[in-house]
Amino acid sequence: MGARADYAATRFHQSHCRLRGRSRRAQQPERMRRIGVLSSASESDSRSKPYYAAFQQELQELQELGWFDGRNYRIDYRFGAGDPDRIRAYAAELVRMSPDVIFTASAATVMALRQETRTIPIVYVLVPDPVANGIAESLARPGGNSTGFATNTLTMGSKWLELLKEMAPRVARVALGVLCWIFAFA
């Protein structure tokens, strides 16, 4: 058979050993991932229902990737119901649980979480101008342990005008009204 056959047999054996090792690792019990969710709304707030429905839809899609609630991840929900003291208490409680990540959707909840931890990743959505709110150093490089999606920021105004000019090149004048919510959370 020669050197070529020996090489092929050796490669087959190495590949088989690697696959066998992977299958052993795959059979080991999975580590339970912990996810914290801190909402500034109440659990029964009708305005929040579409967001929770979208979140639940995303969780269902995770099943297609092999992630199942209660098997390899667990979500701990806390609802602040608009009460700053309750939000701070729930932020501290979630941090004590040591989740792998915390999701949230308001500047007030991000600020409360950042007061409690500088190590657990915080992912936020629907936060108006995280730079002005002191949540991020910049949109390009938020810094710290929090990141997410900003809603309206004043620095995006030039981009809005650029897009408007592409869509309607004949527009000569534009009036822009901006309502900026800055949430201070002491």
Image (tube, helix red, strand yellow):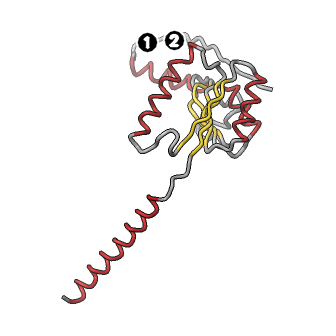
Nearer to me, 68 or 134: 68
The CA distance from mark 1 to mark 2 is 7 Å
Instruction: Say whether marks 1 and 2 touch (CB < 8 Å).
Output: yes
Residue 39 in the image, given as x and y percentages of width and height: 64, 25
Residue indicated by mark 1: 171
Hey, which residue is sitting farthest left in the picture? 1
Residue 13 in the image, given as x and y percentages of width and height: 33, 77
Placement of 110 over or under 27, stated as above or below: above
The quadrant in which the C terminus is found is top right
Residue 65 in the image, given as x and y percentages of width and height: 41, 43
The quadrant in which the N terminus is found is bottom left
Placement of 37 over or under 167, stated as above or below: below
| Residue in the picture at 46% in, 12% down | 172
Q: Please name the amino acid that badge 2 sits on.
A: Val
| Residue in the picture at 69% in, 28% down | 109
Nearer to me, 69 or 3: 69
Placement of 85 over or under 137, stated as above or below: above
Q: Is residue 80 left or right of residue 12?
A: right
Q: Please name the amino acid that badge 1 sits on.
A: Val
Mark 1 crowdedness (10 Å alpha carbons): few <14, some 14-19, many ≥20: few
| Residue in the picture at 23% in, 84% down | 4
Residue indicated by mark 2: 174
